[in-house]
Amino acid sequence: MSAMRFSESVTGIIQDGVLVVTIDNPPVNAISAHVRQGLVEALDHGASLGLVVGIVVTGAGRTFVGGADIKEFGQPPVEPTLPEVIERIESCGKPIVAAVNGAVLGGGCEIALACHGRVANDKASFGMPEVKLGIVPGAGGTQRLPRLIGTVAAIDLIGSGRAIKAAEALSLGLVDGVAVDHLDAALSLVHDLAGEPLRRTGLLGVPPAEPAAVEAATKKVLSRARGQTAPAEAVRLVKAATDVELRQGLADERSTFLRLRDSTEAAALRHVFFAERQAGKVEKLEGIVARNIETVGIVGTGLMGAGITVAALTSGYRVVGVEQTQEAADKGRERISATLEKSVQSGRLAAAARDGCRARLTVTADAGELASADFVIEAVFDDLTVKTELFQRLDGIVRPDAILATNTSYLNPDEIAAATAHPERVVGLHFFSPANIMRLVEVVDCKATVPDVLASALALARKMGKLPVVCGVTEGFIGNRIFSAYRREAEFMVEDGAAPHEIDAALEAYGFPMGIFAVYDMAGLEIAWARRKRQAATRDPNARYVEIADKLCEAGRFGRKTGRGWYDYSGGERAVDPAVKTLIEAARGAKGIEPRHFSADEIVTRLLKAMADEGAALLAEGIAGRPGDIDLVMINGYGFPAHKGGPMFAADLDTTS
Ligand code: T1G
């Protein structure tokens, strides 16, 4: 029979007495208005045709349904709404089975929940990621999911937004079956269900749950919320499913969804979602093909090098690690092995995958082995002489088409590139530690970098599962330059009267996991001190300079690892140290500064402004391409709370509100 078209993105075909409805709305089959309209048309058609015993709903391509269309969120509503479509599915007189493949997310999961049966293939993954967008499910997810899989599992999934694979979905009862051919299995299920009383999820009772387990699941979600509103609301709604009628639960869910959808938190998280998808896209690279990279050379297998090695191995690359001596190579191999092992223990890596990683790894003291590498990343000591000498040596070892990347944090990669015979093949890749875990990578487009080298660096970072942000050459790139401005402003406030712990408390209340002085202590104060000493000769004598951090270092207070820094850690926990107060008072006294009070509001406002101003300068200088890129760097590298959208988003809000 020929295909039927119900809307521009929904088609149907009758197969074996079943109407198979396909949602085809690339790239992820989001539930745009024409999908909802098409689904209603298809349901009506299927219900009215006498020869049709039931309906299968499936998605075209790699995805079932990636959720509501996020692009419609800021726009006036278009009928039918998703809850209306879902109500039609659940109450249909004929069996409807979801045949799911790929991602089944948000509203896609809610469609599947309302069907009378669900069959998945083994590539399916399920999730209710709404809290990650600052909202709660808006089409019955909080009410139907607990009815199907129980309150505890529903709190976990909806509260965290995490996705699960088909096998876990099966064990939770979220799907009825997993099959190689999900469409075939769904057709059979429709025939099995035809003529039987249908299992309508919304009419099921919520299975009883242990109160202690419900509380534990709730606590887990709330402890990770860090000032975000949506997770607590999601948990509240899931719990209510046990106590209230479906209709009341759905109404509460819908009004909560609509309220949160229009919140600043949701706007911030939507901004982050789209910024992530924009990141690493560069106009001048359109049509440029990345080189084929199979073997990655990594010079230096210390903490950073080992982390990069693990990230490369776990994403399928062969890695040649190079050290200066056999002893250092052995240590490096052990470090890499231990990091792989940790990944297995934490569940990030399957044991079989670890064995594959080991088989693809060589660590050697023979730099000549880098001749097999397509892409070499150096992660040696951050010193200009060390790095330029290394790159000159690499010039004579690597293949002419190999790419060289420097992982410097503060040096000028243009100077490193200039020392080589082929600066056009040099690019910067600034990883964040631990490099196997942190997603952010600043990809530095150097003066001489040619487009296909930049495109290849971006492709490599993406294949490693990283979030690449392109930036130009400047001291500290995007992140550390903004961090310096942020730190400078925090130190000005300390000198003017704010206590470090007051600044940290204000930042933590705003949503940072840790205030700036606590971060400082954790990272160690001595590297920045050494840099300040190096820069002392060239510093503008008229610029304000706060000496307190230098005084702490002079007193041997290098942070957590020495037990003392901005705080005292001798009792195990971070504690305010009267000695630091005395030191700060002396510094103020020396400059004749009369200390004044700073409210938490003023502290946060000033720090956000310092970050946004530096960000604006980076944009004006062409170092950063988009405000969203800056926000991503600060969120993923420096603990800026995602639900505040990043410093540029926050500044924009300030000027528009
Ligand atoms: N709406 C609109 N556009 C979307 C979209 C969506 N839901 N999901 C992805 N895109 C765009 C994305 O911007 C990009 O566009 C392209 O698709 C490919 O995305 C009522 C309230 C599905 C796992 O949160 O997690 O349902 O950059 O690069 O790596 O309760 O996209 O090409 O122009 O990410 O293959 C809940 C979000 C919505 C899912 C595919 N759903 N999406 O990953 O491709 S709220 C989500 C994803 C909701 C209901 C509610 C992923 C993916 P461009 P991509 P991918």
Image: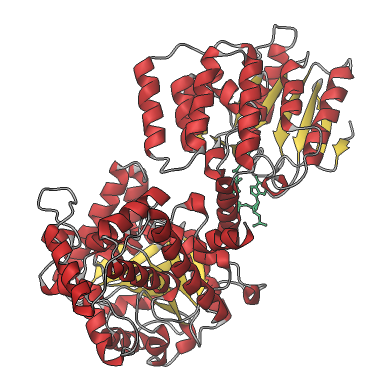
Residue at left offset 73%, top offset 22%:
87
Quarter of the figure with residue 179:
top right
* 245 w.r.t. 237: above or below: above
Q: How many marks?
A: 0
Whole-percent x and y of residue 345? 28, 42
Residue at left offset 19%, top offset 72%:
526
The way the protein has been coloured in the rendering is: secondary structure
Quarter of the figure with residue 110:
top right
Whether residue 291 is visible here, answered yes or no, is no
Q: Nearer the viewer, residue 377 or 200?
A: 200
Residue at left offset 89%, top offset 30%:
1
Q: Is residue 178 left or right of residue 377?
A: right
Whole-percent x and y of residue 452? 56, 77
Q: Nearer the viewer, residue 547 or 242?
A: 547
Q: Is residue 643 left or right of residue 140?
A: left
Residue at left offset 32%, top offset 52%:
505
* 588 w.r.t. 102: above or below: below
Q: Nearer the viewer, residue 279 or 332?
A: 279
* 295 w.r.t. 358: above or below: below
Q: Is residue 330 left or right of residue 346?
A: left
State which quarter of the image contains the C terminus.
Answer: bottom right
Whether residue 452 is visible here, answered yes or no, is yes
Whole-percent x and y of residue 184? 68, 27
Q: Nearer the viewer, residue 603 or 72?
A: 603
* 176 w.r.t. 618: above or below: above
